[in-house]
Image (spheres, rainbow, N blue to C red):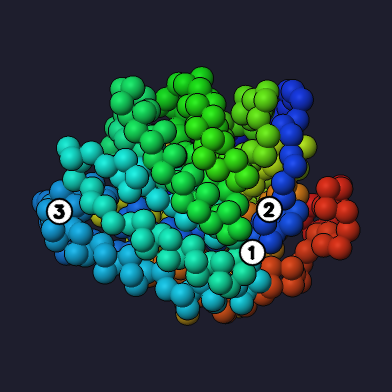
Amino acid sequence: MKIFRVISTAAVLLVSFAYSTPVARTKRFGKGGDVIRGVNLGGLFVLEPWITPSLFEQWNGSNRKVVDEWTFCSELGAYECTRRLKQHWSTWVTETDIKTLASLGLNHVRIPIGHWAFAPDPNEPYVQGQIPYLERIIRWIGKHGLNAVIDLHGVPGSQNGFDNSGKFGAIGWQTSQQNIDRSIQAVEGIARVAANYPNIVDAVEVLNEPANWGLSVDQVIEFYKRAYTSFRKIAPSAIMVVHDAFLSPSDWHKFNVPGWDNVILDTHNYHIFVKDRLVLSREQHLQATCEDARNVRSFNTQLWTVTGEWSLASTDCAKWLNGMEKGARWDGSLPWEMNGPVYQGATCSGQNSISAWDQDTRTFFRQFAETQMDAYEAGSGWFFWNFKTEVADDWNYIKLAQNKLIPVPPTNRIYSRYSLDSDRWNIKLNSTWCHE
């Protein structure tokens, strides 16, 4: 879920793309047509303490460091972990949730899942049993007129060291061939599910957020090539999705592989995990989306470019967002490069609760939602993170939409920069914040 792209705001404006021949594109995005508008079902098959803190609360303040799904199952043991997770899998995403998402005017749902559901290892503490719940959700998605993307969110050894990979800590994915082989096994397992639901699952993401700072990018691309070959043999009609490995837009051409067809590039945009974005004023947050629009629109001519994760968060104050029992950069409770809060007196109080937001804050979040939607639709669309959360309202699409802080349907925009009836591939930005 997290993004640590190390690139200055000024540098983004100077990007020049080195293009090769565009990847062939013969498919569209299911019921989305030319543009994806969707949400993520995060916190379901890959636990994240900040999304569902109730699952981790018993260890709050404990000397037993339970920080992710690996340690959750290691601490509980296989029997109890299985019991608790089956309860979670059966309740965190319900048919009512899927029906609600459809009623909000969305057309896609992205479903993160870990390798351990498809390529288990008895030496790992993870438990299995996810696939029947996954398939039930896929059927609900189809029943309510949506399409699904299944996302391999964690691989053996961890591709980024984040808790959302299943195991917090070292980046060890590329340290053994066995890790790579098991990752391919997981891709093949997901592809088989996709092949069983060809009218619902229209894409598979073969690896979420590989961290370029801890991996060989060349080896990541070689993995993508191998995954493409394996994936195409099983699910030839589905679209394959590759993540940009947090590389700057000037390096995205590396993912434009000759001979590929029907491939999406996934990039994630958050405004809170790097200093350049976190310190922005509200007005500057809105202006910064103009840069994102230019980047995705430019590369969308080579590979469909989708923003697979974004949110309305303008602070990193959500409880445990930065890790179990860790604080926030915003108020200085998490050690970081500013050695203190973003500004003197910055507080996390009320930052994540709609009930605490005044009218100016509500107006800003509605503008922030629309400017980001506009930006990412300059490419091929978006998936909001997350469909819901237990306590972090600025990450909760359903709650934000129900409170009119996100447009319903997504095209019902008050501050939109462009006509949604105009040429999809010739969008010009024109608003208070952007002029072209």
Q: Is residue 364 left or right of residue 235?
A: right
Pointer 2 with pointer 3, Cβ within 8 A = no
Is 175 above or below relative to 287? above
Pointer 1 with pointer 2, Cβ within 8 A = yes
Task: Residue at 37% x, 69% y: name it.
Answer: 92
> Residue 160: percent from the left, percent from the top?
39, 36
Per the image, label 1 sits on a secondary structure element best described as loop
Label 2, residues with CA under 10 Å away: few <14, some 14-19, many ≥20: some
Pointer 1 with pointer 3, Cβ within 8 A = no
Q: Amino acid at mark 3?
A: Ala
Per the image, label 2 sits on a secondary structure element best described as loop
Per the image, label 3 sits on a secondary structure element best described as helix
The numbered disc on residue 29 is 2
Q: CA distance from mark 2 to mark 3?
A: 39 Å
On the question of residue 81 being in view, the answer is yes
The residue singled out by tag 1 in the image is 107
Q: Residue 12: which quarter of the image? A: top right
Name the one closer to the observer, 238 or 304: 238
- Total count of labels: 3
On the question of residue 375 being in view, the answer is no
Q: Amino acid at mark 1?
A: Asn
The residue singled out by tag 3 in the image is 78
